[in-house]
Amino acid sequence: MLPSLTRREMLLALIGACAIVREGHAAATWPAEQAVGNLLWHADFSLEPHQQLLEEVAQLGFDIAAMLELPPQEEKVHLFLFSRKEVYEAYMKQYFPKVPARRALFIKARGPGMVFAYRSFDFEIDVRHEATHAILHTMTSHVPLWLDEGLAEYFEVPRDRRASDNPHHPVMIEQVRQRQAPRLEQLEALEDLQSMGRDEYREAWGWVHFLMHGPPLATAELRKFLVRDSSEESLPLSRLLRQRLPALDPMFLAHFAENAR
């Protein structure tokens, strides 16, 4: 999750980011450090038991670029991992005192993107989720909140489960059985993380799943939306989709009805 910061908070975050990255590069600052491609891992515990996770997250960059037709990741991303919740919270409070307390975070000021997480029950999910944010933001800056979170929800599960075995899937199928298509425009109106609850995360995931695995025209619009030039008129994705797919909501319902068979 990428928190919305005020100018003062952003300055504090930038100062903290510079200090953290310096520490991350300093010899012997972290008990375990490892570079995997453009991902720089720093942990206060051994990374050896987590090599599969490191490889999965490295693969995320290739998968995101391939599925969304984005340029390959070139910018570095730092991942800071903690063994205990209280150590993580103390560290975040020291460097980012104004950032809302969350189980895991992606933060990007003017330097490289940074992921912070501790070994909770959902540790691997958290790391994949926040790493998706970090990697995606090295490839494009055109990611509204709902889409940013929907993509992170999509990529947070292991690779072989993304298309058909996300925990959101059965709930969305039940919602579709009731002929309820989540309104994309309502998701687009959300401006901060505090306005996103469980339903909003599920609905954002649902639209991402439709855009990734539904009609090819929808996938094409998503890809064009993510790489549009910053000087282009910033039409919301919902309007672009409805121009190309007038029956967008019935198509969404049909997509998940088909997935339920």
Image (cartoon, helix red, strand yellow):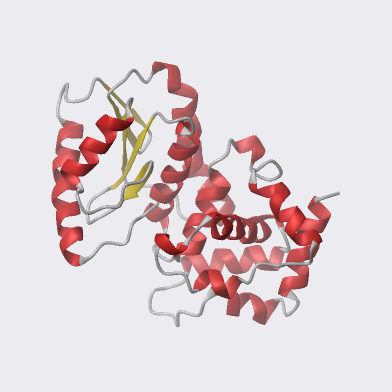
How far from the left and from the top, in percent, is residue 171? 70, 51
Does residue 11 sit above or below 225 in this rendering?
above
121 w.r.t. 233: above or below: above
- The residue located at (19%, 52%) in the rendering is 13
> Closer to the camera, 149 or 56?
149
Disc tally is: 0
Q: Is residue 64 left or right of residue 141?
A: right
**Horizontal and vertical percent for residue 49?**
44, 17
On the question of residue 143 being in view, the answer is no
Q: Is residue 50 left or right of residue 239?
A: left
Q: Residue at x 71, y 76 (%)?
A: 245
Image side of residue 40 versus residue 223, left or right = left
Q: Is residue 111 above or below residue 39?
A: below
Quadrant of res 160? top right
Seen in the picture, residue 259 relative to 27 is either above or below; the reply is: below
Residue 232 lies in quadrant: bottom left
Residue 242 visible within the image = yes
**Which residue is at a point 36% across and 36% down the rendered structure image?**
117
Q: Which of the pair 220/206 is nearer the observer?
A: 206
User: What residue lies at 40% left-to-right and 51% top-to-bottom?
Assistant: 1
Q: Position of residue 163 (x, y in %)?
A: 68, 45
Toward the right, the furthest residue is 261
